[in-house]
Image (spheres, grey):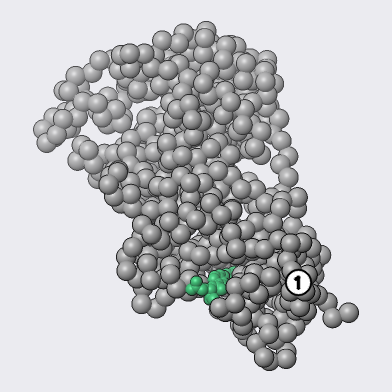
Amino acid sequence: MHDTRLSARAQAFLALLRERLVIFDGGMGTMIQGHALSEAQFRGERFAAWRSDLRGNNDLLVLTQPTIISTIHRQYLKAGADVISTNTFNSSPVSQADYGMESLVGEFNLAAARLARQAADEASAETGAQYFVAGALGPTSRTASLSPDVNDPGFRNISFDELVAGYTMAVRALVEGGVDIILIETVFDTLNAKAALFAVREALDQAGVDLPIIVSGTITDASGRTLSGQTTEAFWNSVRHARPAVVGLNCALGGKQLRPYIEEMARVADTYVCAYPNAGLPNAFGGYDETPEQTAAILAEFAASGFVNMVGGCCGTTPDHIRAIAGAVAGLAPRVVPIIPRACRLSGLEPLNIDADSLFVNVGERTNVTGSAKFRKLIEAGDYTAAVDIARQQVANGAQMIDVNMDEGMLDSPAAMTKLLSLIAGEPDIARVPVMIDSSKWSVIEAGLKCVQGRPIVNSISLKEGEEAFLAHARLCMRYGAAVVVMAFDERGQADTLERKVRICERAYGLLTERIGFAPEDIIFDPNIFAVATGIEEHNRYSLDFIEATAAIKQRMPSVHVSGGVSNVSFSFRGNDPVREAMHSVFLYHAIRAGMTMGIVNAGQLGVYDELNPELRELVGFWSRSAA
Ligand code: THG
């Protein structure tokens, strides 16, 4: 679907990745420093009277010292780079605001892209080979999923929407300037990267073109995690929805320290992998001492181990490093992209992959203002500290995900969703699990999607308002990177018979997979768990209908998952927890056998089927076993 809109050069880049190890360029900052430019040189004529100091604003040089930047590009191309990246690491509104130059961001990106394009084209004319330009989008100086203030963990100094606006402007200019590839690099905070990916896909769609995307994260220290706390696989799960052509790691660590994480990326990513580390760890003066031969030996070992498809350098590396790297990997085979089994791949700070072999996934239900009076009162009173503790308890009690619902008439639900998710993001013992964003209002769901760096589940969308609204929401789930709970609900209402449950799910499946290419493994059907034993005879079939619908759905659509709100089934026994718990255990015993993959439950309050009082088990089993 994407390939048709790829330019000839973009296709040539992908062809090169299939053929051999691709060589990326090296550090730009190091090379600029080598010129020891003065304040006046940074300013040039045009900004001679600018109100603030400009020395150190390297991105400005594409306007004031274009020859220096072109020369650096040429040096890298001469050294053997196939791909050069634009000098736009800080060409975002937030970064340029430090210099009062935020209104020049479009111009910076356009000029930088044109300089790199020209250098690449000239090199092609000289050698006859193809060279590619990657338009660089840096991380900005702010983090969307972390608070800059330790005393106010829910505070953010940048929003998802602000990042999207800045990245959109940059991408448009980079594309206009002729880049072949979009490079989202040095990702500290995956939420920033998700905003960049969102902006890139939207901007490319609007321009009617497609470009390959490279996403490169940064592992900041020996913890092996990004600055925002994710493991390598969690990072991959968070960005794979954008189908990057290349994913990898760059910067902070030297190649030696990067090895286990590149190995991990090579194992989990079903796309090309890149590594462009710094020239070792910085010395006491912030400089880099690793020689070209040392860096080259490390990257050649990565290549020989089958970890990488593209290699280059970051801070401290020079054209000599790139020349040595290109020499050392010449003739080594590129990594073979593995075929990764289908799974619903989610993440918090850690990955959660759900496939046919997974154990049942418990989703904590207590962070729900409509499902817990205690939680509702805390949120209404603004006691978010205690509300966050409820989330913590759910995870401590075994919830592998938490359902968050703020649908209460008296609340500003989008604000409450934003606040709770922002607070949770700063608590590693909670944030390690993915979030299930639960609301019947799309505005609340979208507010939640803008807060999570991991890959969440949207709970829920349905055909309630017709096909177009359903598909529009599903498309946005793909764009934000979320799996989705689809309720068995259509224009006529909630499905309350076995036949309607299955029919609606099949209709939704057809629309999602055929009309918009939604991955089946990211669809989680909820065929409605209703209360039994209400005193109305027909209601007694409700749990059986759910269980039989689950079996039918799994039989007809084997790759999808099935979920439900388990505590709903026992509403008639409110206040009688022993009976409710027994009902949940027996219900799950049968539903899991029928293929239910996950359920929203009171984590820590689930009985073990085999340990139930046999008489109670027999009595509550009435509603969950087939009538035969
Ligand atoms: N499907 C999907 N999402 C859902 C549901 C579903 N989200 C909400 C709900 N149903 C699942 N969550 C709960 C949470 C709590 C209870 C039931 C379902 C519950 N609460 C106690 C009660 O009402 O008796 C609360 C008592 C208290 O105040 O502590 O039972 O079906 N996709």
Q: Residue furthest right?
A: 628
**x, y (%) of residue 524?**
65, 63
Along the line of sight, which residue is nearer the eye, 136 or 11? 136
Along the line of sight, which residue is nearer the eye, 623 or 141? 623
User: Residue placed at 64% from the left, 80% from the top?
Assistant: 531
Question: Image quadrant of residue 448?
Answer: bottom left
Amino acid carrying label 1: it is Arg
The answer to whether residue 64 of the structure is visible from this angle is yes
Vertical relation: 446 (above or below) 257: below
User: Residue placed at 71% from the left, 53% from the top?
Assistant: 359
Question: Image quadrant of residue 627?
Answer: bottom right
**x, y (%) of residue 392?**
47, 54
Left or right, 582 with reference to 123:
right
State the residue position of label 1: 617
- Which SS class for mark 1? helix
The answer to whether residue 479 of the structure is visible from this angle is no
